[in-house]
């Protein structure tokens, strides 16, 4: 090799110039999101009241890293500082939690709750954007939010994340379209497993729960997100419309818990209970041991009604529970009730006290007005017929018995033993 050839080779080595046979075309980078799969997870209801509505999450699988991350907007901690007080005030703090798929499935296996998944037919760029969006929102400085059980909950956050990468298609397909039922309808059908909890929540819900909602708002329920996603078609390759859901499968199936398709027809049961309590209260006008039983029953009812009325007033005026505001049930469960109690135990001949008599008259009036509004919900704006059926007769009976007992002349009614 001549000195010229040796010099050329040396310079080529120094400059890193390859020979044509060794040259390789630059390898194009894999499009962002190509290795990702996106699944909507829908969990069935559970036993606890906060599990009755079901749950959902977004599962991101990365074939390159082997990760299976579940993004869950329903994370909270009862033991966290201030959680209970914030919950009472209507400002509970929830956050976006991230967990491994295996851990998530173990939790739902332990709770015996069903889990279904839908793989979403999203373009690679949108899959990458959803993964970025969720990872960003899971950062400590971004993950916490103020929870609202109808307007901003774990399910509406999943809905909004999906709508973000669907470029508004989910909202466009559902906003303005009539929902299956309003917030009260879905609450009632979800709580049929617990009569006491059902009754308490029906007492606490005001007229905003009864306003009409559309399918977009109805997705506060995870099952409705699952349904709407299943129905949605999106633009696919070449502009053709394709189903958003590429496939569906069940990961866990126990069949232990379920939600009814419609609210229970419990009106007659509430009416019977109210009538029986009122009849028991009426025995307070009898002589002997029965009058004591009647007055004790009336006392208990008035105490419960009074506490209920104070709680309803607090929820309305002292908290951010907007769906408890302007609650007409405060007419049926009156804060005046405790002021009637002393009349039941006032000695014969003394007559009713002015305060007690005014409280009894005011409560009779308020319960009557509340009952009339319940019979004509278009006037009151609130569907609370079941509460009226339960509370009207006992409330009026307790006040009438209290007025009658306290008005008897001396010697007409022996004091209780």
Image (tube, grey):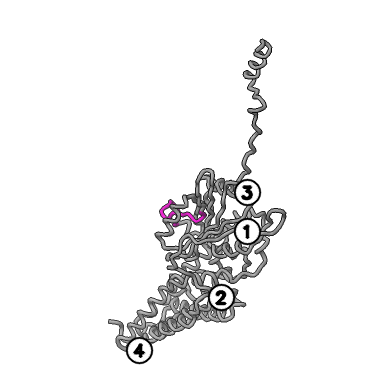
- As drawn, the residue found furthest toward the left would be 417
Q: Is 285 placed above or below 5 here?
A: below
Q: Secondary structure at mark 1?
A: loop
The residue that mark 1 highlights is 244
Q: Is residue 378 left or right of residue 204?
A: right
Q: Quadrant of residue 173?
A: bottom right
The mark that comes first in sequence, 3 or 4, is: 3
Dots 1 and 3: beta carbons under 8 Å?
no
Q: Report the Cα–Cα distance between label 2 and label 3.
A: 47 Å
The residue that mark 2 highlights is 383
The mark that comes first in sequence, 1 or 2, is: 1
Q: Secondary structure at mark 4?
A: loop
Q: Nearer the viewer, residue 212 or 351?
A: 212
Characterize the local packing of mark 1: few (<14), some (14-19) or many (20 or more) Cα atoms within 10 angstroms: many
The mark that comes first in sequence, 1 or 4, is: 1
The residue that mark 3 highlights is 124
Dots 1 and 4: beta carbons under 8 Å?
no
The mark that comes first in sequence, 1 or 3, is: 3
Dots 2 and 4: beta carbons under 8 Å?
no
- In the picture, the quarter occupied by the N terminus is top right
Q: Report the Cα–Cα distance between label 1 and label 3.
A: 13 Å
Characterize the local packing of mark 4: few (<14), some (14-19) or many (20 or more) Cα atoms within 10 angstroms: some
Q: Nearer the viewer, residue 48 or 338?
A: 48
Dot in front, 1 or 4: 1
Q: Secondary structure at mark 2?
A: loop
Dot in front, 2 or 3: 3
Magenta-colored span: 72-84
């Amino acid at each position: 090799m001549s000195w010229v050839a040796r010099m050329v080779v040396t310079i080529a080595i120094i400059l890193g110039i390859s020979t044509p046979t060794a040259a390789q075309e630059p390898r194009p980078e894999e499009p962002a999101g190509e290795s990702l799969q996106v699944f909507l997870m829908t969990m069935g209801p559970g036993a606890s009241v906060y599990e009755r509505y079901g749950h959902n999450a977004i599962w991101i699988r990365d074939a390159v890293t082997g990760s299976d991350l579940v993004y869950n907007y329903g994370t909270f901690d009862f033991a966290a500082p201030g959680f209970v007080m914030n919950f009472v005030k209507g400002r509970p703090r929830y956050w976006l939690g991230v967990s491994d798929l295996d851990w998530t499935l173990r939790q739902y296996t332990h709770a015996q709750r069903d889990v279904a998944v839908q793989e979403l037919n999203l373009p690679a760029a949108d899959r990458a954007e959803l993964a970025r969006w969720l990872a960003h929102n899971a950062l400590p400085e971004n993950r916490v939010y103020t929870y609202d059980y109808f307007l901003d909950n774990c399910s509406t956050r999943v809905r909004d994340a999906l709508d973000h990468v669907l470029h508004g298609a989910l909202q466009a397909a559902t906003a303005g379209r009539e929902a299956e039922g309003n917030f009260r309808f879905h609450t009632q059908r979800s709580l049929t497993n617990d009569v006491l909890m059902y009754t308490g929540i029906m007492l606490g819900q005001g007229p905003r729960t009864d306003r009409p909602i559309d399918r977009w708002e109805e997705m506060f329920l995870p099952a409705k997100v699952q349904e709407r996603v299943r129905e949605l078609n999106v633009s696919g390759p070449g502009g053709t419309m394709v189903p958003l859901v590429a496939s569906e499968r069940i990961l866990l199936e126990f069949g232990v818990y379920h939600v009814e398709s419609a609210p229970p027809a419990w009106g007659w049961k509430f009416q019977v209970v109210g009538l029986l309590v009122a009849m028991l209260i009426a025995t307070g006008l009898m002589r002997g041991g029965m009058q004591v039983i009647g007055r004790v029953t009336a006392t208990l009812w008035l105490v419960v009604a009074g506490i209920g009325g104070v709680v309803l007033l607090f929820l309305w005026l002292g908290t951010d529970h907007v769906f408890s505001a302007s609650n007409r049930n405060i007419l049926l469960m009156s804060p005046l009730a405790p002021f009637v109690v002393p009349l039941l135990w006032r000695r014969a001949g003394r007559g009713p006290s002015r305060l007690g008599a005014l409280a009894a008259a005011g409560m009779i009036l308020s319960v009557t007005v509340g009952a009339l509004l319940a019979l004509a919900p278009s006037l009151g704006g609130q569907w609370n017929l079941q509460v009226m059926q339960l509370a009207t007769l006992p409330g009026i009976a307790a006040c009438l018995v209290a007025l009658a007992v306290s008005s008897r002349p001396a010697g007409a009614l022996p004091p209780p033993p």
